[in-house]
Amino acid sequence: MADPMRIRAQLKDGGVTEVRVLMAHVMETGQRKDGAGNTVPAHHIQGITATWNGKPVLAAQFGPSVSQNPVLNFSFKGGAKGEKVIITWTDNKGDKRTDEATIS
């Protein structure tokens, strides 16, 4: 299982919630070779979703070209201090990670 995501969600002026997510993941492309010359198998995040109050606020697809430990920033209209934002990613090997943050 991957390390927890680091998520920060802040309510800004105008009722916009800004979210910043750091995802710990190796993000292997499947094209790199190890020290013995063998290809390192692909292992990367494919899909990301974010919900607030059970409503989807983000759906994204990643591919092998995204760097290791990717950072994602997005914002949505709505949210209130104390409410939760839930982020879920899935990768090409079927691993899944879900974490949440409280809007401050």
Image: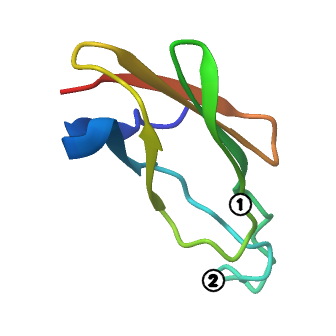
Q: Position of residue 90 (x, y in %)?
A: 71, 38
Q: Position of residue 19 (x, y in %)?
A: 36, 44
Q: Residue at x 29, y 20 (%)?
A: 80
- Give me the C-alpha separation between circle 1 and circle 2: 27 Å
1 or 2: tag closer to the N-terminus:
2
Tell me the mark number nearer the camera, choosing from 1 and 2: 1
Q: Secondary structure at mark 2?
A: loop
Query: Is residue 91 rendered to the left or right of residue 74?
Result: right
Q: Nearer the viewer, residue 56 or 87?
A: 56
Q: Residue at x 79, y 64 (%)?
A: 42
Q: Position of residue 37 (x, y in %)?
A: 76, 86
Residue at the disc numbered 1: 62
Query: Is residue 89 rendered to the left or right of residue 68?
Result: right
Residue at the disc numbered 2: 35
The amino acid type of the residue labelled 2 equals Gly
| Res. 50 image quadrant | top right
Q: Is residue 83 above or below residue 56?
A: above
Q: Nearer the viewer, residue 77 or 89?
A: 77
Label 2 packing within 10 angstroms: few (<14), some (14-19), many (20+):
few
Query: Is residue 82 rendered to the left or right of residue 98?
Result: left
Q: Secondary structure at mark 1?
A: loop
